[in-house]
Amino acid sequence: MIPPLIVRQALHLGLGLIAITDHNACDNAAAVLEAAEGTGLRVLPGMELQTREEVHLLCLFDTTEQCQKWQDEVWTKLPVAPNKPDVFGEQFVVDATGQLIRTEERLLATSASIALEEAADRVHALGGVAIPAHVNRPSFSLLANLGFVPEGLDVDALEVTSRFEPEAGFRQWPQLKSWPLIVGGDAHRLNEMRRGTRFRIADPTVREIGLALKGEEGRQAVAG
Protein backbone atom coordinates (compact mmCIF):
# COMPACT_ATOMS: atom_id res chain seq x y z
CA MET A 1 0.00 0.00 0.00
CA ILE A 2 1.20 3.52 -0.84
CA PRO A 3 1.77 5.83 2.18
CA PRO A 4 -0.32 8.84 0.97
CA LEU A 5 -3.19 6.51 0.09
CA ILE A 6 -3.01 4.82 3.49
CA VAL A 7 -3.27 8.22 5.14
CA ARG A 8 -6.12 9.33 2.88
CA GLN A 9 -8.10 6.16 3.53
CA ALA A 10 -7.54 6.40 7.29
CA LEU A 11 -8.82 9.98 7.32
CA HIS A 12 -11.78 9.00 5.14
CA LEU A 13 -12.70 6.34 7.70
CA GLY A 14 -12.41 8.84 10.53
CA LEU A 15 -9.44 7.11 12.13
CA GLY A 16 -7.25 9.12 14.46
CA LEU A 17 -4.60 6.47 15.14
CA ILE A 18 -3.16 3.66 13.03
CA ALA A 19 -0.11 1.42 13.27
CA ILE A 20 2.14 0.21 10.47
CA THR A 21 3.17 -3.36 11.22
CA ASP A 22 4.87 -5.07 8.29
CA HIS A 23 5.88 -8.69 8.60
CA ASN A 24 9.19 -8.94 10.51
CA ALA A 25 10.13 -5.42 9.38
CA CYS A 26 9.78 -1.73 10.26
CA ASP A 27 11.33 -0.12 7.18
CA ASN A 28 8.12 1.36 5.72
CA ALA A 29 6.82 2.88 8.96
CA ALA A 30 8.84 6.10 8.63
CA ALA A 31 7.36 6.79 5.19
CA VAL A 32 3.79 6.61 6.49
CA LEU A 33 4.67 8.79 9.49
CA GLU A 34 6.05 11.40 7.10
CA ALA A 35 3.04 11.15 4.79
CA ALA A 36 0.75 11.77 7.78
CA GLU A 37 2.53 14.91 8.97
CA GLY A 38 0.11 17.83 9.33
CA THR A 39 -3.00 15.71 8.77
CA GLY A 40 -3.93 15.08 12.41
CA LEU A 41 -3.51 11.32 11.92
CA ARG A 42 -1.15 9.68 14.41
CA VAL A 43 0.88 6.74 13.10
CA LEU A 44 2.65 4.29 15.39
CA PRO A 45 5.63 2.42 13.94
CA GLY A 46 5.60 -1.28 14.60
CA MET A 47 6.15 -4.82 13.41
CA GLU A 48 4.16 -8.02 13.11
CA LEU A 49 6.78 -10.45 14.37
CA GLN A 50 6.54 -14.14 13.56
CA THR A 51 7.96 -15.91 16.59
CA ARG A 52 9.63 -19.28 16.86
CA GLU A 53 6.22 -20.82 17.62
CA GLU A 54 4.85 -19.27 14.38
CA VAL A 55 2.72 -16.92 16.46
CA HIS A 56 2.23 -13.40 15.12
CA LEU A 57 3.01 -10.71 17.71
CA LEU A 58 2.16 -7.05 17.21
CA CYS A 59 5.01 -4.86 18.46
CA LEU A 60 4.13 -1.16 18.69
CA PHE A 61 6.43 1.75 19.51
CA ASP A 62 6.35 5.53 19.78
CA THR A 63 9.35 6.20 17.55
CA THR A 64 10.91 4.80 14.42
CA GLU A 65 14.22 4.64 16.31
CA GLN A 66 12.73 2.18 18.82
CA CYS A 67 11.23 0.16 16.01
CA GLN A 68 14.51 0.09 14.11
CA LYS A 69 16.35 -1.17 17.18
CA TRP A 70 13.80 -3.98 17.42
CA GLN A 71 14.20 -4.80 13.74
CA ASP A 72 17.97 -4.96 14.17
CA GLU A 73 17.48 -7.52 16.97
CA VAL A 74 14.92 -9.55 15.07
CA TRP A 75 17.00 -9.73 11.92
CA THR A 76 19.85 -11.37 13.83
CA LYS A 77 17.38 -14.17 14.54
CA LEU A 78 15.99 -14.60 11.02
CA PRO A 79 17.34 -17.24 8.64
CA VAL A 80 19.71 -15.74 6.09
CA ALA A 81 17.91 -16.71 2.92
CA PRO A 82 16.89 -14.86 -0.25
CA ASN A 83 13.27 -13.90 -0.82
CA LYS A 84 11.34 -15.83 -3.47
CA PRO A 85 9.23 -13.14 -5.17
CA ASP A 86 7.32 -15.66 -7.27
CA VAL A 87 6.14 -17.32 -4.04
CA PHE A 88 6.01 -14.56 -1.43
CA GLY A 89 5.84 -11.43 -3.58
CA GLU A 90 8.24 -8.52 -3.79
CA GLN A 91 9.30 -6.77 -0.58
CA PHE A 92 9.29 -3.06 -1.42
CA VAL A 93 10.63 -0.23 0.74
CA VAL A 94 9.16 3.13 -0.31
CA ASP A 95 9.38 6.81 0.58
CA ALA A 96 6.59 9.10 1.81
CA THR A 97 5.29 9.61 -1.75
CA GLY A 98 5.28 5.90 -2.54
CA GLN A 99 8.38 5.98 -4.74
CA LEU A 100 10.52 2.85 -4.59
CA ILE A 101 13.68 3.19 -2.49
CA ARG A 102 14.80 -0.41 -2.73
CA THR A 103 13.61 -3.98 -2.80
CA GLU A 104 14.42 -6.02 0.30
CA GLU A 105 16.10 -9.18 -0.95
CA ARG A 106 16.17 -11.01 2.37
CA LEU A 107 13.32 -13.42 3.06
CA LEU A 108 10.98 -11.93 5.67
CA ALA A 109 8.09 -14.40 5.36
CA THR A 110 9.54 -16.76 7.94
CA SER A 111 9.87 -17.26 11.69
CA ALA A 112 12.52 -15.61 13.83
CA SER A 113 14.31 -17.84 16.32
CA ILE A 114 12.88 -15.96 19.30
CA ALA A 115 10.24 -17.32 21.64
CA LEU A 116 6.99 -15.47 22.25
CA GLU A 117 7.74 -14.75 25.91
CA GLU A 118 11.24 -13.49 25.15
CA ALA A 119 9.98 -11.31 22.32
CA ALA A 120 7.35 -9.66 24.53
CA ASP A 121 9.96 -8.97 27.19
CA ARG A 122 12.31 -7.36 24.69
CA VAL A 123 9.56 -5.18 23.21
CA HIS A 124 8.72 -3.92 26.70
CA ALA A 125 12.39 -3.25 27.40
CA LEU A 126 12.49 -1.06 24.30
CA GLY A 127 9.44 0.89 25.50
CA GLY A 128 6.79 -0.75 23.34
CA VAL A 129 3.63 -2.75 23.77
CA ALA A 130 3.29 -6.41 22.74
CA ILE A 131 -0.01 -7.90 21.59
CA PRO A 132 -0.47 -11.40 20.10
CA ALA A 133 -2.26 -10.88 16.80
CA HIS A 134 -5.58 -12.35 15.60
CA VAL A 135 -5.47 -15.01 18.33
CA ASN A 136 -8.69 -16.67 17.11
CA ARG A 137 -7.46 -17.22 13.57
CA PRO A 138 -6.79 -20.83 12.47
CA SER A 139 -3.17 -20.13 11.51
CA PHE A 140 -0.20 -18.13 12.80
CA SER A 141 -2.03 -17.41 16.04
CA LEU A 142 -1.59 -18.03 19.73
CA LEU A 143 -4.65 -20.24 20.16
CA ALA A 144 -4.20 -22.18 16.93
CA ASN A 145 -0.53 -22.97 17.51
CA LEU A 146 -0.36 -23.32 21.30
CA GLY A 147 -4.01 -24.06 22.10
CA PHE A 148 -4.04 -21.75 25.13
CA VAL A 149 -2.63 -18.54 26.59
CA PRO A 150 0.51 -19.51 28.56
CA GLU A 151 0.29 -18.77 32.25
CA GLY A 152 2.28 -15.67 33.15
CA LEU A 153 2.58 -14.46 29.54
CA ASP A 154 3.53 -10.78 29.85
CA VAL A 155 1.67 -9.14 26.99
CA ASP A 156 -0.52 -6.05 27.04
CA ALA A 157 -3.67 -7.42 25.38
CA LEU A 158 -4.85 -9.98 22.85
CA GLU A 159 -6.05 -9.07 19.40
CA VAL A 160 -9.11 -10.81 17.93
CA THR A 161 -10.44 -10.56 14.40
CA SER A 162 -13.50 -8.48 13.51
CA ARG A 163 -15.45 -11.73 13.15
CA PHE A 164 -14.93 -12.69 16.79
CA GLU A 165 -18.26 -13.28 18.52
CA PRO A 166 -17.83 -12.95 22.29
CA GLU A 167 -20.46 -15.49 23.36
CA ALA A 168 -19.15 -18.29 21.15
CA GLY A 169 -15.53 -17.21 21.52
CA PHE A 170 -15.56 -17.19 25.32
CA ARG A 171 -17.28 -20.55 25.32
CA GLN A 172 -14.54 -22.01 23.13
CA TRP A 173 -11.66 -20.18 24.86
CA PRO A 174 -12.69 -19.29 28.44
CA GLN A 175 -9.23 -17.80 29.11
CA LEU A 176 -10.04 -14.84 26.87
CA LYS A 177 -12.50 -13.50 29.44
CA SER A 178 -9.63 -12.46 31.69
CA TRP A 179 -7.75 -10.52 28.99
CA PRO A 180 -8.23 -7.07 27.46
CA LEU A 181 -9.21 -7.66 23.84
CA ILE A 182 -8.71 -5.37 20.87
CA VAL A 183 -9.88 -5.59 17.28
CA GLY A 184 -7.25 -4.57 14.75
CA GLY A 185 -7.54 -3.89 11.05
CA ASP A 186 -4.91 -6.42 9.86
CA ALA A 187 -5.28 -4.68 6.49
CA HIS A 188 -3.11 -5.69 3.56
CA ARG A 189 -5.11 -3.60 1.06
CA LEU A 190 -6.76 -0.19 1.27
CA ASN A 191 -10.27 -1.65 1.05
CA GLU A 192 -9.51 -3.84 4.07
CA MET A 193 -8.90 -0.86 6.36
CA ARG A 194 -11.66 -0.41 8.93
CA ARG A 195 -12.43 1.00 12.31
CA GLY A 196 -11.31 -1.23 15.15
CA THR A 197 -10.72 -0.50 18.81
CA ARG A 198 -11.71 2.88 20.25
CA PHE A 199 -9.30 4.36 22.78
CA ARG A 200 -10.08 6.98 25.38
CA ILE A 201 -6.61 8.40 25.94
CA ALA A 202 -4.97 11.75 26.62
CA ASP A 203 -2.38 11.38 23.86
CA PRO A 204 -1.82 8.82 21.08
CA THR A 205 1.24 7.25 22.72
CA VAL A 206 2.27 3.75 23.69
CA ARG A 207 2.11 4.66 27.39
CA GLU A 208 -1.46 5.93 27.04
CA ILE A 209 -2.48 2.86 25.09
CA GLY A 210 -1.00 0.69 27.83
CA LEU A 211 -3.05 2.56 30.45
CA ALA A 212 -6.21 2.17 28.34
CA LEU A 213 -5.68 -1.56 27.94
CA LYS A 214 -5.41 -1.85 31.72
CA GLY A 215 -8.35 0.50 32.30
CA GLU A 216 -6.21 2.75 34.50
CA GLU A 217 -6.28 6.49 35.22
CA GLY A 218 -9.57 6.99 33.41
CA ARG A 219 -8.26 5.56 30.13
CA GLN A 220 -10.32 3.00 28.25
CA ALA A 221 -10.13 0.66 25.27
CA VAL A 222 -13.31 -0.66 23.68
CA ALA A 223 -13.01 -3.36 21.03
CA GLY A 224 -15.22 -3.36 17.97
Image: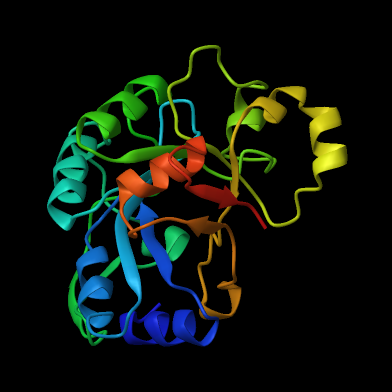
Vertical arrangement, residue 195 with respect to residue 221, above or below = below
Residue under the point 77% across and 24% down: 174
Query: 138 or 33, which is in the foreground?
Result: 33
The percent coordinates of residue 166 (x first, y second) are 80, 42
* The quarter of the displayed image where residue 22 is located: bottom left
Residue lying at the far top in this picture: please name it: 151
Residue lying at the far front in this picture: please name it: 218
Residue under the point 28% across and 52% down: 25
Residue under the point 40% across and 41% down: 210
Residue 36 appears in the picture as rendered? yes
Query: 13 or 207, which is in the foreground?
Result: 207
The image quadrant where one finds the N terminus is bottom left
* The quarter of the displayed image where residue 194 is located: bottom right
In the image, 82: left or right of 147?
left
The percent coordinates of residue 223 (x first, y second) are 63, 52
The percent coordinates of residue 105 (x first, y second) are 22, 58
* The quarter of the displayed image where residue 112 is located: top left
Q: How many marks?
A: 0
In the image, 208: left or right of 139?
left
Residue under the point 71% across and 29% down: 177
Query: 70 or 195, which is in the foreground?
Result: 195
The image quadrant where one finds the C terminus is bottom right
The percent coordinates of residue 80 (x first, y second) are 22, 39
Vertical arrangement, residue 30 with respect to residue 87, above or below = below
Residue 58 appears in the picture as rendered? no
Vertical arrangement, residue 181 with respect to residue 122, above or below = below
